[in-house]
């Protein structure tokens, strides 16, 4: 479905032909599908899955239904990391630049950015139990990161600036097969760590003290959850730019659908919904049969922001 | 012969502050035996919670030892401790969609594998805990749909399913009306008799504790004593509990009276 929509409409039958390796009736169609649409669909799936799972982990860890990679400023943290690398590269010696500007370097910078923001939020969250205050802190981190990026742009060249601006608009396309491979590895590593955390996450539903009384090694569990979240949010932000609200909204969609808090069910349902929601957003961003392509970030925000407002308004006990 | 599960030796509790240690009570020598329902009483701020936190290993003692089955508590890793000691806390549960059954099932976490799959044995223990606490009819309800009194029983069931010899409860009767206070304490009493567990709970319902518990631990700012409730009455200990001449203990009625 996703693959058949785009600026040029290609019949679904032809899409399948290309996918299974037969020659489609037009060579251009085949080229578009294999080198543009298919990678884009795969990216959408990876991004959707990764951000949603990151959101699920954060909502349970912070015991906060409104936590998510974007809202708590993780995406901004990643942006800051990337900005340092892309915009600040000129201050470093040549050989370091080439290492840092490789996709791998950007991923690391981005993961580190989100990791540090997450740590900072965690420190603050320990002192403030209030849901709304933590969100405000997340907002402050975003502003801080934005301001810092602003300072960096002031000192950078037009070329670097353009590169960074394109990145920050967020896009699922333009990823080479190599980048997709790197992204998949990072996302799968994050998912594996999350999968290992299912049992600790379930005990955290009772709160930190009960979880400890159940024999949970809280520090270790928390570290694994934070690592998983940073890898997922960081690597995705590195490749697709900051994408809003998916990580916040999707876990709630799966919680509302399945009416459960059991993470062994939520993990898989969030995974599935994450992929579906992102593919739908991607289709919408291309406005079928027209040439207009909206930034993916705009589409997810248009869908996600009302969901957040709805959640705030109907803040009930079964929010989680 | 009494079988002692938890024992303290010259325990001193309190906090370590920047200016040195802030000791609350020292020389605590307690013996918690199997099959006993033990009430911990004392006025607000005297250190009941600190004592419970120290006994459960959450907080380190300033001096002395806490021994569980004759082994110092710090020798246990968190998993082994979870198999010997379960708790019911006063803190509110975070918002979640957990059902009563799932909540009780979480008590099996120290025994399940890495993904938390319940074995036949686990399901058996969970159902046993649910039957003992008589909450079968709530099994499939969400934990936020039931009343405070029912939730307290569910939390006790969770501690039961953890299958430990010792259960420690922090103020399980607070926020409940008389009917539910009595029903929770009766349940605890029944559990000590039927399962031979040792149950320690802190409470402000002294009248009820005197009637229901096998032993009591009385904390005052001078000392900490453990004995049977009737002995405490004979010695007139309850009169010294509150440092206020307007409150006195009537030995005949077995309850506190206020002077007008």
Image (tube, helix red, strand yellow):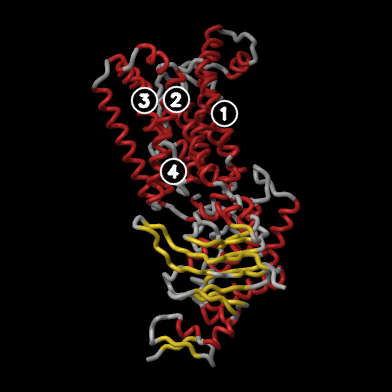
Mark with earlier residue (1, 3): 3
Circle nearer the N terminus (1, 4): 4
Circles 1 and 3, Cβ within 8 Å, touching? The answer is: no
Name the quadrant containing residue B6. bottom right
Residues at circles 3 and 4 in contact by the CB criterion of under 8 Å:
no
Which is more N-terminal, label 2 or label 1? Answer: 2
Give the mark toward the camera: 1 or 3: 1
Badge 1 crowding class, 10 Å Cα cut-off, few under 14, some 14 to 19, many 20 or more, is some
Residue depicted at x 50% and y 83% = B237
The disc at residue B170 is none
Above-or-below relation of B174 to A231: below
Chain for disc number 2: A
Dot label at residue A188:
1
Local SS, label 1:
helix
Label 4 marks a residue whose chain is A
The first of marks 3 and 4 along the sequence is: 4
Residue B191 makes an appearance in the image = no
* Circle 4 residues within 10 Å: few <14, some 14–19, many ≥20: many
For marks 1 and 3, give the CA distance. 24 Å
Crowd class of label 2 (few under 14; some 14 to 19; many from 20; radius 10 Å): some
Residue indicated by mark 4: A67
Question: Which-is-in-front pick, marks 1 and 4?
Answer: 1
Q: Work out whether disc 1 and disc 4 sit on a shared chain.
A: yes
Q: How far apart in space, not on screen, are marks 2 and 3 (Cα)? A: 17 Å
User: Which residue carries the number 3 mark?
Assistant: A168
Label 3 neighbour load within 10 Å: few <14, some 14-19, many 20+? many
Q: Which residue is mark 2?
A: A108
């Amino acid at each position: 479905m996703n693959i058949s929509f785009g600026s040029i409409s290609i019949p679904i039958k032809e899409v399948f032909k290309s996918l299974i390796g037969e020659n489609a009736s037009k060579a251009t169609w085949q080229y578009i599908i294999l080198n543009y649409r298919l990678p884009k669909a795969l990216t959408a799936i990876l991004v959707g899955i990764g951000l949603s799972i990151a959101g699920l982990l954060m909502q349970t860890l912070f015991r906060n239904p409104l936590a998510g990679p974007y809202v708590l400023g993780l995406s901004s943290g990643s942006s800051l990391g990337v900005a340092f690398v892309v915009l600040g590269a000129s201050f470093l010696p040549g050989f370091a630049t080439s290492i840092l500007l490789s996709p791998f370097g950007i991923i690391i910078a981005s993961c580190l950015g989100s990791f540090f923001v997450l740590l900072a939020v965690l420190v603050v969250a320990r002192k403030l139990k209030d849901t709304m205050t933590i969100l405000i802190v997340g907002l402050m981190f975003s502003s801080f990161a934005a301001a810092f990026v602003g300072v960096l742009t002031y000192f950078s060249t037009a070329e670097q600036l353009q590169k960074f601006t394109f990145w920050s608009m967020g896009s699922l396309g333009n990823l080479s097969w190599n980048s997709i491979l790197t992204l998949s590895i990072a996302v799968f590593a994050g998912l594996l760590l999350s999968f290992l955390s299912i049992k600790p996450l379930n005990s955290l539903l009772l709160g930190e003290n009960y979880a400890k009384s159940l024999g949970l090694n809280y520090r270790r569990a928390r570290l694994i959850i934070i690592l998983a979240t940073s890898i997922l949010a960081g690597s995705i932000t590195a490749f697709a730019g900051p994408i809003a609200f998916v990580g916040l909204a999707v876990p709630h969609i799966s919680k509302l659908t399945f009416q459960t808090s059991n993470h062994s069910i939520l993990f898989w349902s969030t995974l599935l919904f994450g992929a579906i929601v992102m593919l739908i957003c991607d289709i919408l961003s291309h406005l079928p049969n027209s040439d207009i392509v909206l930034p993916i970030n705009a589409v997810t925000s248009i869908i996600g922001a009302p969901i957040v407002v709805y959640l705030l308004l109907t803040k009930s006990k079964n929010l989680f | 012969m009494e079988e002692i599960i938890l024992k303290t030796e010259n325990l001193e509790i309190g906090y370590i502050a920047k200016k040195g240690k802030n000791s609350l009570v020292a020389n605590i020598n307690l013996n918690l035996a199997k099959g006993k329902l033990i009430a911990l009483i004392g006025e607000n701020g005297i250190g009941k919670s600190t004592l419970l936190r120290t006994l459960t290993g959450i907080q380190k003692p300033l001096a002395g030892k806490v021994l569980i089955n004759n082994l110092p508590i710090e020798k246990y890793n968190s998993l082994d401790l979870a198999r010997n000691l379960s708790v019911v806390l006063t803190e509110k549960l975070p918002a979640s969609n957990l059902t009563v059954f799932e909540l009780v099932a979480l008590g099996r976490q120290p025994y399940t594998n890495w993904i938390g799959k319940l074995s036949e044995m686990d399901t058996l223990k969970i159902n046993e805990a649910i039957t003992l606490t008589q909450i079968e009819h709530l099994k499939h309800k969400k934990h936020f749909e039931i009343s405070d009194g029912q939730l307290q029983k569910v939390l006790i069931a969770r501690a039961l399913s953890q299958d430990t010899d010792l259960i420690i409860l922090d103020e399980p009767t607070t926020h409940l009306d008389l009917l539910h206070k009595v029903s929770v304490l009766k349940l605890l009493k029944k559990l000590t008799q039927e399962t031979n567990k040792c149950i320690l709970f802190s409470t402000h319902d002294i009248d009820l504790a005197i009637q229901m518990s096998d032993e009591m631990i009385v904390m005052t700012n001078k000392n900490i004593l453990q004995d049977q409730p009737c002995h405490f009455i004979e010695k007139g200990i309850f009169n010294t509990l509150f440092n206020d001449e307007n409150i006195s203990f009537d030995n005949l009625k077995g309850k506190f009276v206020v002077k007008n």
